[in-house]
Image: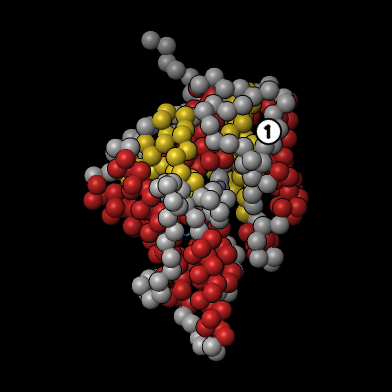
Amino acid sequence: MEERKDVLILAIESSCDETAAAVVKNGREVLSNVISSQIALHTLYGGVVPEIASRKHIEKINQVIEAALSDAQTALSDIDAIGVTYGPGLVGALLVGVAEAKAIAYAAKKALIGVHHIEGHIAANFIEHPDLEPPFLSLVVSGGHTHLVRVKDYGKFDIIGRTRDDAAGEAFDKVARAIGLGYPGGPKIDKVSGEGDPEAIFFPRAHVEDAPYDFSFSGVKSAVLNYINGCKMKGEEYSRADVAASFQKAVTDVLVANAMYAAEEYGADKFAIAGGVASNSALRRTMSSACAERGVKLYYPSPVYCTDNAAMIGVAAYYEYMAGVRHGWDLNAVPNLKLGERYE
Ligand code: KG4
Ligand code: ZN
């Protein structure tokens, strides 16, 4: 029998504030994963400044790709396809990656595959879990998204729930700023929460009427702001660690409650969490015990594959490639790209 040839994907990610490139073999094996983070730069402004992000991407992208190829000990000629995030994200940031991917694919005569960023986040779970295969349920929690997704097959998704306002990561970032922890807030809240009491202050858990899988985080965010303003007006000190821990608990309680309701309703036996907030220790802990109670197997990526990276884009691109997806030279950045079935 003829041995199947390995498929090597060079993947590029530039949708927000990380310039990233990776080489992925057969959709599951990461040969290299290079990330140039702009976090330090944006910290000066308390959040991502889109124009600065685009400029930094254009400065870094060639070096990052060169490093990804050399770390993987792979020549461009050995690559089968170029995978690139083309949405959702910041348009100027996405355009850098898309233009770069098109230029390389055109010059080196490679297949071009546009990837949905959220599909990439979900696919990050395939890297370290060879046993994970669809169908499964996924909770995607990042700075820009909070989605409950039914992964019906590779590249086939149904969004069953979403946030009505802020994304979970966005709420973490805003609350962190309000209590003086700075950007990016998620990891900082996670850390100081370890010293606080999650039961110290009760913050509301929002349930969206008639939409049991949807989320809303603007209420809890406002409640935290009101609480700290109230303390300031009364001239009282508040415990940053208690506020952080109580807020984190309010957010993770809702995420886990909706996720478990979906797991029960859909009879899921596998659940994967994804996105930057999936590295939150309280979320991992609470999800682990909630899944264990129900006999559901929980998957999550290592922190480096939770936050933005190109390896996850390479994994998703592989499954698109195997399904025959090829994009043309008219591929463009789509800032509000929807997650669908084999989108165009
Ligand atoms: O997936 P990601 O890198 O970018 C987007 O696609 O948005 O997610 C970044 C988000 C930020 O909001 C960051 O604060 C949050 O993930 N985050 C965390 C943690 N690590 C990153 N949130 C809570 N706990 C963490 N440990
Ligand atoms: Zn992301």
Quarter of the C terminus within the rendering: top right
Q: Residue furthest bottom?
A: 235
| Residue 308, placed above or below residue 232 | above
**On the image, numbered disc 1 is attached to which residue?**
101
Residue at 52%, 28% (x, y): give it. 341
Question: 270 above or below 35?
Answer: above
Q: Residue at x 62, y 31 (%)?
A: 114
Q: Nearer the viewer, residue 132 or 79?
A: 132
Instruction: Pick whichever, 149 or 66, lies toward us.
Output: 149
**Residue located 64% across and 49% down the image:** 16
- Rendered location of residue 133, percent (x, y): 37, 32
Which amino acid is tagged 1?
Ala
Extreme residue in the top direction? 1
User: In terms of depth relative to the viewer, which is nearer, 261 or 341?
Assistant: 261
**x, y percent for residue 201:** 41, 74
Q: Residue furthest front?
A: 210
Residue that appears at 74% across and 55% down: 52
Instruction: Name the image colouring.
Output: secondary structure
- Cβ at disc 1 under 8 Å from ligand 2: no
Residue 250 is situated, as x and y percent measured from the top left of the image, at: 41, 64
Front one among 289 and 14: 289
Observer able to see residue 68 = no
- In the image, residue 293 above or below residue 224: above
The answer to which quarter of the image holds residue 317 is top right
